[in-house]
Image (spheres, grey):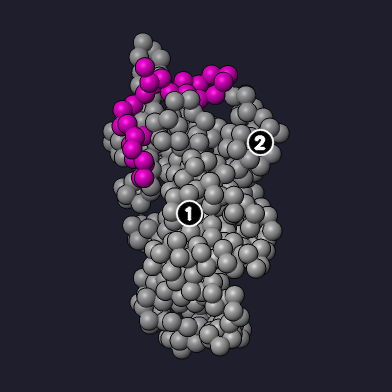
Amino acid sequence: MPENILKQFHGIPGVTMAKAKALYEAGYESMDALSRATPEQLSEVKGISGKLASEILEHLNSQPFPEEPKVMHASHLTEEETLLSSGLELHRQGKWGQALQIINDILEKSPGNLKAMTAKADVYLSREKFQMALDIYDEVTSLDPEIADSWVGKGQALLALDQKTRAVSCFKKALSLDPGNETALEKLGEEDRLPTYVDGLDNMLEGGIPARHIVMICGRAGSMKSSFAYYMMHKLSEKEGRKTIYMSLEQSRQSILKHMKKLGMKKESAKNMMVSDMDDMVVVDMAALRKESDSETIQQIDWLKSILNQLKSYKESYGCDAVVIDSLSALYSLTTFKNPRSELFFFFEKLRDLGITVFLISEMYGVEQSQFGQYGVEEFLVDGIIHIKTEEYANRANLFLGVVKMRETNHERDYFPLIVDQFGFGIVRD
């Protein structure tokens, strides 16, 4: 699957890398072929809605296509390029010794040949000589920090040497240079986890929440769901330098900060955290909103789309690793669903397309308050569910935390006492 075509497709607004692959696999192998399709034909491709199909064609018709990259024929290659090409082919065939001999001959004549240096590091990586590979990748990235594949190779070598934090940084650097780099995306998905800083919980989650998961934090009223979520965002900013957002649909910014300050969390210690009550588009007080706006105006706003646009804008303007949306019930109260299952499926998929970790605060529903989402489909759409429940004992309400679901993670399913004190949150596992 040609990477240059996928990158061109991925450059179209609204087309993720997964959708770019789906378009290519559907038979659209160039921008020209894509432009000649009809909206109806494009909307038959998996993940391409009718609206997105129209937007794709509108975008293509509004600007000239990028030139197709020219193929370098053998007659145009220099002697070094021809030798390197043969060395790379030997490497692909698993003939590492012969490949290394050719690459070393090139480097003896041209010590600064970055392509040959990278090829040599790739050979060492294949032969599991990880430190030798890392030393060369270090040199290449120092000489030219704009080569994405060198950062990917460096990250793989670091992973093999059990230096995960540095490896994750390398994969992120590669993605900043080449957003569609599949190896970097795959490795980040495997290795990048967001620690919760809840004492005892991260060990249970193999280090934390897998990056880019969508996780519901569920519980009855008064179970400290919002405080728990805010605590995680605060700590990710304070301890990890991650850029996080706490987006409230009900409570004002001032009220949130005042409450969290009482729990020992000061905004100034979490410089990368943004607290938003969305006062530029919605909703500090739902009752006031309904009183001050006529019902027709309320119904005309696509709130799900507004949330997605707001988050996309935040990410593009400031960067974002994780966001809390507090809460689903507030969002639902502003939305009239015609087909909840279908509309929520696409909303969750578009949240996933943002490439950030999303935490959704959810009230418990049903007669016994045992249903995690209002419509009964949310628990199947999300990647994880953290349940905070309350149990009354001796005239006191005690909190217990359980991880009901967490994809890509081997975890216990028991409930543990949840403690909140001046040091933060923690679970008791003994």
The quarter in which the C terminus is drawn is: top left
Q: Residues within 10 Å of mark 1 (few under 14, many from 20)?
A: many
Callout 2 secondary element: loop
Q: Position of residue 146 (x, y in %)?
A: 65, 62
Which residue is pictured at 63% across the width and 40% down the height?
Answer: 241
Give the residue drawn at x 37%, y 75%: 25
Foreground of the two, 132 or 247 = 132
The numbered mark at residue 428 is none
Q: Amino acid at mark 1?
A: Leu
Is mark 1 in CB contact (under 8 Å) with mark 2? no
Instruction: Pick the residue in front: 124 or 414.
Output: 124
Q: Which residue is mark 2?
A: 270
Quick check: 429 above or below 46?
Answer: above
Element assignment for label 1? helix
Give the residue displayed 48% in from the left and 74% down from the top.
86
- Front residue of 272 and 409: 409
**Residue 85 vertical position relative to residue 162 in the rendered view, above or below:** below
| Res 166 → quadrant | top right
The boundaries of the magenta stretch are: 403-430
List the residue tagged with mark 1.
125
For residue 46: magenta?
A: no
